[in-house]
Amino acid sequence: QVQLVESGGGLVQAGGSLRLSCAASGSIFSINVMGWYRQALGKQRDLVATITSGTSTNYADSVKGRFTVSRDNAKNTVYLQMNSLKPEDTAVYYCYFNLRTDDSGRSYRYWGQGTQVTVSS
């Protein structure tokens, strides 16, 4: 069984910064892609950033230049550094891992519990 635990959300003023963390534990054979989605109240869940096992990154246009995704493979952890935050960044942020629990080759997606980020104007 695999668990993802997020931390680092909170309330911040516009222009401020927050750093989210998401650590995976349990029966993990290998991790491929890690990343973050967010869901604002009443809206769909949207992709924010991804990072592959080769550390290639991808960002939503709305966060490019402000957010940075990184990973620590030794700790099975993904981070999201968020700078120059705007009120429109307010949402629940969810991390995800695409990982394998054995060497069968099948990969599954696991989700964190979500953490609230609120940016005040």
Image (tube, grey):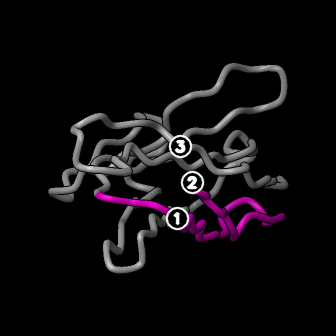
Q: Which residue is drawn at 46% across and 57% down?
A: 67
- 114 lies left or right of 104: right
Q: In which quarter of the image is residue 83?
A: bottom right
Q: Residue at x 57, y 54 (%)?
A: 1
Q: Mark 3 points at which residue?
A: 110
Disc on res. 86: none
- Is residue 52 one of those drawn in magenta? no
Disc on res. 1: 2
- View extreme (bottom): residue: 74
Q: Which residue is drawn at 70% across and 39% down?
A: 88
Whether the residues at callouts 1 and 2 have beta carbons within 8 Å, the answer is yes
Residue type marked 1: Gly
Secondary structure beneath dot 1 equals strand
Q: Where is residue 47 in the image (x, y as percent from the top left)?
A: 49, 33
Does 102 appear above or below 68?
above
Mark 1 vs 2, N-terminal side: 2
- Residue range corresponding to the magenta coloring: 2-29
Residue type marked 2: Gln
Mark 3 vs 2, N-terminal side: 2
Magenta: main secondary structure equals: strand
Disc on res. 26: 1
Q: In which quarter of the image is residue 18?
A: bottom right
- 82 lies left or right of 59: right
Mark 1 vs 3, N-terminal side: 1
Does 85 appear above or below 40?
below
Q: Where is residue 36 in the image (x, y as percent from the top left)?
A: 51, 46
Residue type marked 3: Tyr
Q: How far apart are marks 3 and 2 (CA)?
A: 10 Å
